[in-house]
């Protein structure tokens, strides 16, 4: 990944490991899929002398994923432009979040590298209804039966339109668990304008992008309780850390909001795995170092994440058994066919992974 981002070929040791007859290329492909980085591996096999020594089905798989994801991201960019234009007509310049940012900011050297499931947009809370009404007027509708807007929520139910590449998730908040770490009003106020082929969108500043990226993974129940991380998130963190001023702003905000250790561990992980892209960060304390080593050790021990998923399931089950509110919420979810289908698919992936 680092070599491809820098536009250079793999070093000799990495290339030798890749073409070693004992290399588990199927396992590598599965691991890349779990970490959402498969399209980033395609440039690694571009060198003709390397391609000739790799199985054709492996190179074809990586090229296919990259090509199809590039095609999808082009479609997503067109969809984003259309949505932004609709919102611009009622005076809203949406702030792009997460993967949507990568469609316009050029952080990756290749726009086809970033997997994304949906398009996340941040809109001022007092304009939520206007934004939904405008998108509804051009064919978008909520994917859930209820379109209620609760008092406190991170985003509205997804909006879908037949024929579009992805759903639209409109956010009024970013990290409701720790608003002060990445406050929506601050993000809106400091986002920079970007022209998207005639449409006007905004991109959060680098410090806010780092805070949202780190906070999103920290408060993701599945990742945090299971002790996992996404290599894609770590790589994006490393690339964003090239802005040293933004890193300083992030650490200051983290110290004020009680998330200093979490932020330093995540930055340390980026520095450890991608030193080519991260400026020297001051070493953390002993506990932070141990947490960093534990994350890496668990990833090596349980690379398919089966055991960590089982631990998470046990913790989640205990939470349901101990909380009447959680039992009621689970009971209401079980009435949804979409929820049951997602649960069944998750279990199948867990037990069929190797």
Image: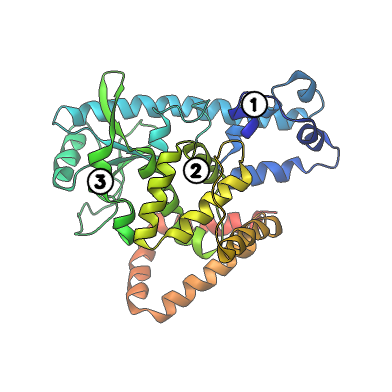
Q: Marks 1/3: CA distance? A: 38 Å
At x 20%, y 37%, the residue is 136
At x 70%, y 54%, the residue is 354
Q: Residue lying farthest bottom?
A: 322
Q: Quadrant of residue 140?
A: top left
Kindly state the secondary structure of the residue where label 3 is placed.
helix
Mark before the other along the chain sequence, 2 or 3? 3
Q: Marks 1/2: CA distance? A: 21 Å
Residue 1 at least partly seen: no
Judge from the rendering whether residue 244 lies leftward or rightward of residue 352; answer left or right.
Answer: left
Kindly state the secondary structure of the residue where label 1 is placed.
helix
Q: Marks 2/3: CA distance? A: 20 Å
Mark before the other along the chain sequence, 1 or 2? 1
Q: Read off the residue under disc 2.
A: 237
Is 95 drawn above or below residue 109 in the view shown?
A: below
Expressed as whole percent of the image width and height from the top left, the position of residue 188 reads: 24, 41
Is 47 drawn above or below residue 330 in the view shown?
A: above
| Mark 1 neighbour density, 10 Å: few (under 14) some (14–19) many (20 or more) | many
Expressed as whole percent of the image width and height from the top left, the position of residue 290 reads: 61, 64
Question: Of 270 and 169, which appears nearest the observer?
Answer: 270
Q: Which mark is residue 186?
A: 3
Q: Read off the residue under disc 1.
A: 43
At x 18%, y 39%, the residue is 131
Q: Which mark is residue 145?
A: none
Judge from the rendering whether residue 58 lies leftward or rightward of residue 232; answer left or right.
Answer: right
Expressed as whole percent of the image width and height from the top left, the position of residue 342 reads: 46, 55
Q: Nearer the viewer, mark 1 or mark 2?
A: 2
Expressed as whole percent of the image width and height from the top left, the position of residue 205 reads: 34, 38
| Mark 2 neighbour density, 10 Å: few (under 14) some (14–19) many (20 or more) | many
Report if the CB atoms under discs 1 and 3 are less than 8 Å apart: no
Report if the CB atoms under discs 1 and 2 are less than 8 Å apart: no
């Amino acid at each position: 990944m680092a070599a491809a981002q820098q536009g250079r070929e793999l070093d000799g040791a990495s290339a030798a490991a890749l073409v070693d007859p004992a290399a588990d290329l199927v396992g590598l492909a599965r691991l890349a899929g779990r970490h959402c980085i498969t399209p980033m591996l395609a440039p690694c096999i571009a060198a003709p002398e390397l391609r000739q020594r790799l199985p054709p089905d492996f190179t074809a798989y990586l090229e296919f994923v990259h090509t199809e994801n590039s095609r999808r991201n082009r479609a997503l960019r067109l969809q984003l432009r259309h949505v932004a234009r609709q919102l611009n007509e009622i005076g809203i310049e949406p702030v792009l979040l997460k993967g949507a940012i990568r469609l316009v900011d050029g952080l990756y050297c290749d726009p086809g590298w970033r997997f994304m499931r949906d398009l996340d947009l941040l809109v001022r809370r007092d304009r939520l209804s206007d934004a939904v009404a405008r998108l509804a007027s051009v064919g978008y509708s909520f994917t859930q039966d209820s379109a209620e807007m609760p008092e406190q929520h991170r985003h509205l139910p997804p909006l879908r339109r037949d024929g579009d590449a992805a759903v639209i998730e409109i956010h009024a908040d970013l990290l409701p668990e720790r608003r002060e770490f990445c406050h929506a009003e601050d993000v809106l106020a400091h986002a920079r304008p970007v022209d998207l082929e005639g449409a006007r969108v905004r991109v959060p500043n680098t410090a806010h992008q780092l805070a949202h990226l780190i906070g999103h993974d920290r408060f993701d129940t599945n990742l945090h309780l299971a002790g996992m991380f996404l290599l894609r998130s770590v790589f994006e963190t490393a690339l964003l850390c090239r802005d040293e001023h933004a890193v300083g702003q992030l650490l200051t905000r983290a110290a004020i909001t009680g998330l200093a250790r979490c932020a330093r561990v995540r930055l340390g992980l980026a520095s450890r795995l991608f030193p080519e892209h991260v400026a020297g960060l001051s070493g953390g304390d002993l506990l932070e170092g141990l947490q960093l080593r534990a994350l890496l050790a668990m990833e090596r021990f349980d690379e398919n994440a089966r055991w960590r998923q089982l631990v998470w399931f046990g913790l989640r089950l205990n939470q349901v058994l101990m909380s009447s509110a959680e039992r009621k919420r689970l009971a209401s979810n079980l009435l949804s066919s979409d929820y049951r289908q997602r649960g069944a698919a998750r279990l199948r992936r867990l037990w069929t992974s190797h």
